[in-house]
Amino acid sequence: MIIKTKCIFCSNNFLKNKRIPVAIRLKALQSVLIPIDKYAGELFGMSEQRNSSIQKVSAQELRLISEVGKSTALNRLKTEA
């Protein structure tokens, strides 16, 4: 999870940057960040604890791109993305 955490902190500026179109930020999420999540799950195993932390990080990334708070339902964000 250390690698994933470093990746999140490095990508925060990119994901928050309003000059970059949302479509490009979503594509980066789908093509770079989510595969890192999946690889971490395969590498370390998908226990319930690891799976929930990976899902939390992915939700945080999606919320950064969408510029919404924690109270917004993830199902709504995923259907709009």
Image (spheres, rainbow, N blue to C red):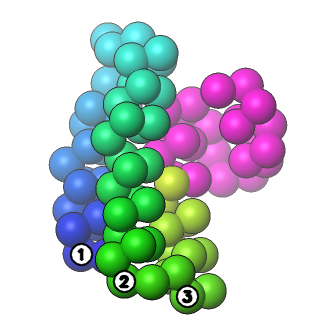
Is residue 78 located in the magenta-colored stretch of the structure? yes
**Which kind of residue does numbered mark 3 sit on?**
Ser
Looking at the rendered structure, the secondary structure element under dot 3 is loop
Q: Quadrant of the C terminus?
A: top right
Q: Nearer the viewer, mark 1 or mark 2?
A: 2
Residue 76 versus residue 7 in the image, above or below: above
The amino acid beneath tag 1 is: Ile
Please tell me which residue is depicted at 54% across the width and 41% down the height of the picture: 62
**Mark before the other along the chain sequence, 1 or 3:** 1
- Based on the picture, tell me whether residue 41 belongs to the magenta stretch: no
Query: How far is disc 1 from disc 3 in space, using C-alphas?
Result: 17 Å
Measured as percent of width and height from the top left, residue 1 is found at: 31, 76
**Residue 44: which numbered mark, if any?**
2
Mark 3–mark 2 Cα distance, whole angstroms, equals: 8 Å
Q: Nearer the viewer, residue 45 or 21?
A: 45
What residue did someone put label 1 on?
2
Residue at 37% from the left image edge and 35% from the top image edge: 31
Q: Quadrant of residue 69?
A: top right
Marks 1,3: beta carbons within 8 A:
no
Looking at the rendering, the stretch of residues picked out in magenta corresponds to 59-81
Q: Main secondary structure of the magenta part?
A: helix
Write down the residue under mark 3: 47
- Nearest to N terminus: mark 1 or mark 2: 1
- Inspect the image, locate mark 2, and give the three-letter code of the amino acid beneath it: Phe
Say whether residue 18 is visible. no
Element marked by disc 2: helix
Rounded to the nearest angstrom, the CA distance separating label 1 from label 2 is: 12 Å
